[in-house]
Image: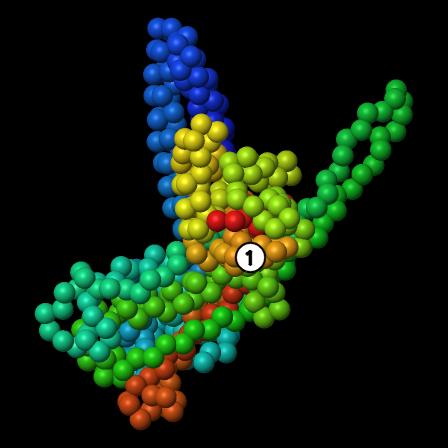
Amino acid sequence: MNRIPDMIEKRGALVDEMSGLVAKDLAGNLGDEERARFESLDGEVKALDAKINRARKVEEYERRAEATPVSGDPMQRELSRYSVAAAIRGALDGKLTGLEAECHAELSKGRETRGVMIPVAVLLGERRALTTGGSAGALKGTDLLSEAFVDRLRPALVTERLGATVLGGLTGNVDIPRLTGSATASWVVEDGSATRSDQTFDKISLSPKTIAAETQFSRRLMLQSNPTIEGIVRNDLAFMLSAGLDSAAIKGGGANEPTGILSLAGLQTVALGTNGAAPTPDHMADLIALPRIANVTASCAFLTNEKVRKAAMKSKDAQSQYYGVPKFFQSETVAFSNQIPSNLTKGTGTNLSAIIYGAWSDLFIAYWSGVDVLVNPYHQDVASKGGVLVHAFLDADISVRHVESFAAIVDAIA
């Protein structure tokens, strides 16, 4: 049983009591016993914060353990030994060996592949930190200042980190039964008959949709460079695929891509104004209430963009005191990513931002097989330069357990 919501609820009650004592203190009516009570409450809140953080760490570890989207004996090995660069070099030379060859053989069973199959966990699991300096051409140099590698600016990838449920190693289309209506009890008169009622069901359907990424490398770089090329290749491929998955989970429009949260039919929303409006803590409370009123009991969190964070930091109460980000979001967990759109429109309002609140464990991210990487040295863009194009293909789909698990604001002026 997940006790995090209970602890958060208890923490909220303690903070409310502390707020009442602060109000009395400001009015000059706080006695010695009440001061002692405040200190006691402060200790309890700090202890609860520590417990909540520990529980969330355990949740994250359990989620990662369940999320590893690979199976089979080779896949159970220490994948930290897996080299993406070696797999690409092997595919280029037609000489795939070692762990990379075993993983390819396992992941290719019963599937059509374009190139070399790389485990999803290698690219989309815990991405390794980049460790080298300079651009791709500079990686052949000596005395690299590896700790100073300057990666490009990237939006934060958050849906899996917030707790999305990952389904891995799938082979065919997946249907997940869903209970939509329960049988009900009724009161009967003496010697009367009970009223019969039935459960109703539907299903969540997941089927593979292909996301593709493409990047270019020098062949000499792949064959001769410092081993730090491994981190760069791994992280760039991982980012391109992860960014596409994150974007689809948030706002995918269906058809060739999955349907994201903001595109769900029946998504609950809190409207701020005819042409949009600035969000307030009261609006956050309204957003929190929607899944709870719909009987969603799982841990929930906010997700929005950096423009909304800026607006929250500048927001003030009636006494011109800054709320601060935690108070603005009602002390709920909040994450920020510029994958959340900030270019929405409503009425005459433009450049409006979205704010999502929901139970992220009710978001399903499904993977089929591994990442299929095709190394192409013959494309006209690279053939004359001796380079290679690397194409990465991943079959995945995204869905939600219940649309009621999420609610959103889509007209925030930030």
* Residue 80 pos. (x, y %): 28, 61
Q: Residue at x 61, y 39 (%)?
A: 290
* Residue 78 pos. (x, y %): 30, 60
* Residue 54 pos. (x, y %): 36, 36
Q: Residues within 10 Å of mark 1 (few under 14, many from 20)?
A: some
Q: Residue at x 59, y 64 (%)?
A: 253
Residue furthest top in the image: 32
User: What kind of residue is marked 1?
Assistant: Thr
The correct choice, above or below, for 345 with respect to 328 in the image is below
The one of 363 and 198 positioned closer to us in this rendering: 363
The one of 315 and 286 positioned closer to us in this rendering: 315
Answer left or right for 211 relative to 22. Answer: right
Helix, strand or loop under label 1: strand
Residue furthest bottom in the image: 384
* Residue 149 pos. (x, y %): 21, 64
The correct choice, above or below, for 26 with respect to 403 in the image is above
The one of 293 and 409 positioned closer to us in this rendering: 409
Circle 1 is placed at which residue position?
A: 350
Q: Residue at x 42, y 46 (%)?
A: 309
- Please say whether residue 296 is visible from this viewpoint: no
